[in-house]
Amino acid sequence: MTVAAWLLRRLVASIAIIVAVVTFVFILIHLAPGRPCGGRDEIVDPTICEQVNRQMGFDRPILEQYGLYLVALAHGNLGYSFSLRRPVRDAIDDTLPFTLQLAGVALVLDFLLGLALGIYQARRANRLPDVILGNVTLFVYSLPTFWLALLLLLVFGEKLAWFPVGGPSDPVLCPVIDSAFCVADRLWHLVLPATTLGLVGAAGTARFQRAAMLAVASQDYIRTARAKGVPERRVVLHHQLRNALLSFITRFGLALPFLLTGAVLIETIFAWPGMGRLGFEAILTRDYPLVTATALIASTIVVAGNLVADLLLGVADPRLRVRAAEDLDIVTA
Amino acid sequence: MLLRPSLPSFVVIGVITIIGCERRGGCTGANCGTLINAAVAEPGTLLPPSSEDIVANDINEQLFLKLADVGMSENTLGDEDFQPLLAQKWEWDGPLTLVFHLDPRARWHDGAPVTAADVEFTFNAYTDSAVGSPFRPKLRRIASVTQRDSLSAVFRFRERYPEMFYDAVYHMRILPAHLLRPVPRDQWRTAAFGRKPIGSGPYKFVSWQPAQAIELVADSTFFLGRPGVRRLIWRFTPNLQVAVQQVIADQADIREQLVTPENVERARATPQLSVYTYRGNVYTYLTFNERSQEDTTKAHPLFADRELRRALSMAVDRASLLKSALDGLAKVPPGPMSALLWIWDPDIRQLPYDTAQADRRLNALGWRDHDGDGVRDKNGQPLSFHILVPTSSVLRRQYARLLQEQFRAVGVRIEIDELEPSVVNQRVATGKFDAAILSRSNDPSPSSGIAQTWTRAGFGGSNFGRYYSPEFERVVDLAVTAASRDKAKPLWRAAMETLNADAPAIFLYALDNVAAVHKRVDNVQLRPDSWAAVLRTWRIPPDRLIDRDRVER
């Protein structure tokens, strides 16, 4: 099988996964108790709820709603959000960039810090720095994300006032990003949410990377490199790290779901106007079209991320390309 | 050297430099100022007839004017205490006809004059079932609104009653007919106008960044006087604690409700904040469902029994609950009312807290602990029921647990069902509950809210427990039509005492609102029914302006 054929097969499988996720979420949210009406906390007059349900077609049989939804989706129509009173697509367009900014910065922090710590720990395996860092990363990894978020907000936002308490930008100076100052302001607002999300991820990545580096360290080619007198820095970075990167790339695929689910909590706590918060509030208000759309987008990102990770694996490891050519699925390799 | 010259160090220095170079604006006069309100919810729309949420109302107070509004006295009877807004003056033309004369200086923000045609259009829209306005039932006693000339609008009522004027002006914000007439009425809930409104109020709409903020700017030509603060920003934060943190960290100026004693303490300890207490417009109660969960035409196996409800009410020490949970931030309501209502009277007769009497009454009803398991039972059935409470309310969840303890002490077992608000909403509306802890807000008049929630008019609506008392309804009818407060007050008191004796609910607490506002703001007035109603009169003296007040964009 050629790489192109493999890619085509993966694309088809990816689309099937996305359709399955959308179907599952669509049915689940419709079957869940609670009704799509009004605000989060207020009891809305039942007559208004009935009117909303009629207007939105929520009173029709679920299969009919699903059929109509698929037809609309095929035409690129994600539906209408009754809680936001605007097209779902507009809401996604507004919020997705914020989630990508947050997840992107968190991902960079996660991988850079995690990678550095993992390498450092592996080079000092079972020595005091490794033991200390191992416990620290385990501690951070075990922290509930929301708790860490609230702690950082309290200490660095409220008490020390080093960083803003929530929001994506200064509402007075930068309601829109139209200058270098406002770009910096956005980054400033990103520090706490991205650190929360990235720190917990980095702790996991560090442990992952340390184990991968140690697994490679005992390989013959590492011993041979050292015996040939290759400098230690080169041994670590060119021989050991390169081979340990395979698991790192696999973790990239796994990190996306973590970041997107983490973003739900982080965005809510830090008042970050992203898609995670949008989806969370949509679930609370039983805004069916919005819930389904956020699931669709999130699953697409995750599936695409995994596809990219698989491709990168193929690039990084020639053995996998050979196996793919032999009709082996890279994912299982 | 702390930082060696490298790419990261240049980035850090660059960011710090840019952040440090905060742009200084030029505004230094008396009408400068920017106030940021830390709001915990975002409105769905800013089109008044279709917006039922509180934040939308706060913002619409600035954008759309009423013909007149209640004063700080909140007197809703007659017209003496009302303040003119769009209407310069008014007169009664017979017992059922009220004529408003519009202020000729009033303009829409696009420059068009406000006319009587707008008033007529507004009434027709609010009362059109296609619009589905929640205010529609409150306008049912107005027969029509017509225009006599371009600046005179004529209201004709179906009957004569003391709150005619209040009904005519309080529920409707006048809308621009020239902009909304082309929009089909059944599409108003989702109309684009609702996200980019044009009003006639003291502030003009500037921008709406979804899930972030709404910005308004003062209309410097506002016909009733230039607003004191130049810019208002509602910043949306989905979490109350974070909203409070923003105010404490000086990143917002207003949090109109601090809600918990801890937040109040923190605000009091913050040097740049002033704390204001004002009457709340919400009361919270444990309602008993008097109808079967399976079939609302049948009686509930427990709560259809008036004597049982009375005994359970006597088992609850509401004062101690209040002390445990709210520590001076609320009062025990003497009936279904918030402290906003003028009928509030602590001397209204209520069932006493008396566990001995509750014990005797339960015994007399046959509810005894026959099997010694600590729970009363009758005919093999334990005296046990579920309390429904939304997960979104920390306070109500806390109250549910405290109630559970107090009921346990008299041999009643409580199961607490903590559910998402949308599920609570569904179950309460469909009668699928035993008891529920609910909150209701009052407008300044007792007439509409109490009748709507505690009489047959509210069946299928907000009378979720389906309480019905012919005597209560008779006295309420008399109270609603009483000509003055002096005549109405004893009638309301009698109605409340009838209801309290029937114990359809246990009225737990009526919150006092406590707001935190930045100290640099002068002339802070918070009207209890709508804290932002007179925001245009707030001022920031020039010598107290801070950086964000001076910023020009």
Image (tube, coloured by chain):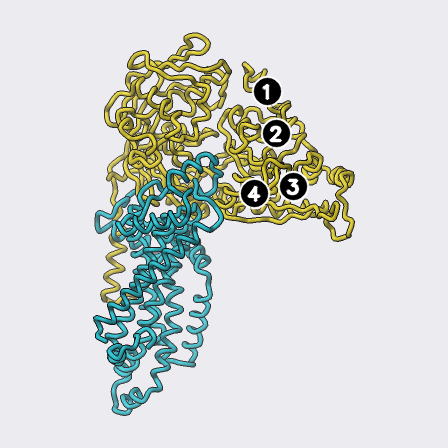
Circle 3 chain: B
**Under tag 1, what secondary structure?**
helix
Mark number, residue B432: 4
| Count of numbered circles in the view | 4
Classed neighbour count for the residue bearing mark 3: other residues with Cα under 10 Å, few (<14), some (14–19), many (≥20) = few
Q: Position of residue B103 (x, y in %)?
A: 32, 17
Where residue B270 sits, quadrant-wise, is top left
Q: Residues within 10 Å of mark 4 (few under 14, many from 20)?
A: some
Whole-angstrom CA distance, mark 4 to mark 1, is: 36 Å
> Which one is in front in this view, the residue at disc 1 or the one at disc 2?
2
Chain in cyan (letter): A
Q: Which badge, 2 or 3, is on the more N-terminal residue? A: 3
Q: Which chain is yellow?
A: B
Q: Which residue is mark 1?
A: B489
Mark 1 or mark 2: name the one nearer the start of the chain.
2
Location of mark 2 (residue): B468
Q: Position of residue B12 (x, y in %)?
A: 27, 60
Query: What residue is disc 3 on?
Result: B320
Q: Is residue B103 visible?
A: yes
